[in-house]
Image (cartoon, rainbow, N blue to C red):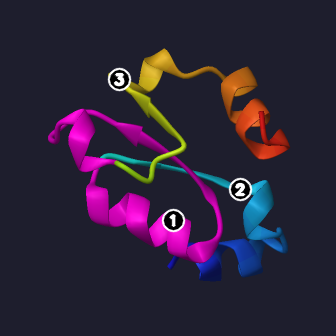
């Protein structure tokens, strides 16, 4: 579904960031070629080994953090 969203937005997946609270969502985001931020709502940190970033709550990530992810920082 994330790959379809990237295509419909006419964006390369590497220019997109998915924010998810489920391990399978993070896996799907990575499979689509996007960056992925895990939000610890229902799972422990260990459940997200492939996430590019992990935050306790959504308000813990700023737009600048997302831009840094897309730029590869």
- Quarter of image, res 46: top left
Residue of label 3: 57
Query: Which type of secondary structure does the marked residue at label 2 adopt?
Result: loop
Residue of label 2: 16
Q: Which residues are magenta?
A: 22-48
Tell me the distance, in whole angstroms, between the alpha carbons under discs 1 and 2: 9 Å
Residue 58, labelled with which disc?
none
37 w.r.t. 30: above or below: above
Seen at 79% across and 42% down, the residue is: 72
Tell me the distance, in whole angstroms, between the alpha carbons under discs 2 and 3: 20 Å
Q: Earlier in the sequence, mark 3 or mark 1?
A: 1
Seen at 15% across and 40% down, the residue is: 42
Query: Which type of secondary structure does the marked residue at label 1 adopt?
Result: helix
- Quarter of image, res 10: bottom right
72 w.r.t. 32: above or below: above
Count the numbered circles shown. Answer: 3
66 w.r.t. 8: above or below: above
Residue of label 1: 29
């Amino acid at each position: 579904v994330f790959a379809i969203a990237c295509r419909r937005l006419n964006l390369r997946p590497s220019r997109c960031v998915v924010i998810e609270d489920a391990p399978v969502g993070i896996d799907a985001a990575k499979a689509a070629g996007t960056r992925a931020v895990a939000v610890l709502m229902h799972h422990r940190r260990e459940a997200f080994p492939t996430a590019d970033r992990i935050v306790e709550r959504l308000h813990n990530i700023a737009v600048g953090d997302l831009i840094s992810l897309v730029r590869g920082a």
